[in-house]
Structures are given as structure tokens and as C-alpha cells.
């Protein structure tokens, strides 16, 4: 009797492991196709310039927030552009588009840390 219980328990564990493996493989296979990569030198940013409400740019050596279409900043930060990674400096050079205020705050938090 004890052997039968051990075999039943082992069988149930094996079935559970098989179901878990099938679900995991199905999840991997069911993911969306990867988005095409952006051309070399161009980043695929979620917010397009035409959709942006704000832009982050360099102003007097610091990161500044610009309203779309404006040439003077709404506000400047104490984030020194020289302290940023080269990739971040390149993004700021062309203007980092932000869809809304929350995205501005998130990006400023990331740049400031």
C-alpha cells in the first residue's frame, strides 16, 4: 500500500511538472514577434517627436524641460549633462521626447540617479 501511494504521488508531481513545462514553453512561443530593430545610429523611442508634449534637452550645461515647439526652457534642473553617460548626452542633443508630465518626471529621475 505504501508503494502505491508513493507511485501515485510521484505520478502527480510528474504530471504537474509536465503541465508547468508546457505552459512555460507555450508562453515563450506565444510571445509577440520581436519588433524590427532601429537603423544604426537611430533609437526607437516610444514617443515620437510629433506626439511629444515636452522635450528634455541640454541648456547651459544642465538638463532642461522644454514645451513642444518652444525654444526657451520651462524649467532647468541641477543635472549636469557632463555627468551623464554618452548615450544619454546624445539623446539630449537631439531632444528627448516625452508624451506627458509623468514621463518627464520618470526620465528626470532616471537621469538624476
Image (cartoon, helix red, strand yellow):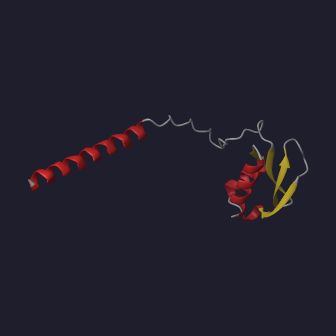
Front residue of 104/71: it is: 104
Side of 111 where 55 appears, left or right: right
Please name whichever residue, 65 or 103, is drawn nearer the observer in this view of the structure.
103
| Quadrant hosting residue 42 | top right
Q: How many marks?
A: 0
Judged left or right of residue 89, residue 15 is left
- Above or below: residue 24 compared with residue 2: above
Looking at the image, which residue sits at the far right? Answer: 72
Image point (74%, 50%), residue name: 102
- Residue depicted at 87% across the width and 56% down the height: 75
The answer to which quarter of the image holds residue 76 is: bottom right
Residue at figure coordinates x 28%, y 46% from the top left: 16
Residue at the front extreme, as displayed: 1
Quadrant holding the C terminus: bottom right
Q: Which x, y percent locates residue 8?
A: 17, 48
Residue 86, given in percent of the width and then of the height, sits at 68, 57
Residue 103 x/y as whole percent: 72, 49
Residue at 88% in and 52% down:
74
Of 32 and 102, the residue lying toward us: 102
Q: Quadrant of residue 80?
A: bottom right
| Image location of residue 105, percent across then percent down | 75, 55
Amino acid at each position: 500500500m505504501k508503494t502505491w501511494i508513493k507511485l501515485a504521488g510521484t505520478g502527480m508531481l510528474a504530471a504537474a511538472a509536465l503541465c508547468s513545462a508546457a505552459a512555460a514553453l507555450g508562453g515563450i512561443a506565444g510571445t509577440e514577434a520581436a519588433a524590427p530593430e532601429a537603423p544604426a545610429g537611430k533609437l526607437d523611442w516610444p514617443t515620437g517627436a510629433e506626439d511629444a508634449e515636452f522635450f528634455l534637452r541640454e541648456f547651459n550645461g544642465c538638463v532642461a524641460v522644454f514645451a513642444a515647439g518652444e525654444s526657451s526652457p520651462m524649467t532647468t534642473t541641477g543635472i549636469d549633462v557632463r555627468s551623464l553617460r554618452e548615450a544619454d548626452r546624445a539623446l539630449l542633443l537631439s531632444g528627448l521626447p516625452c508624451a506627458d508630465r509623468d514621463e518627464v518626471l520618470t526620465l528626470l529621475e532616471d537621469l538624476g540617479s
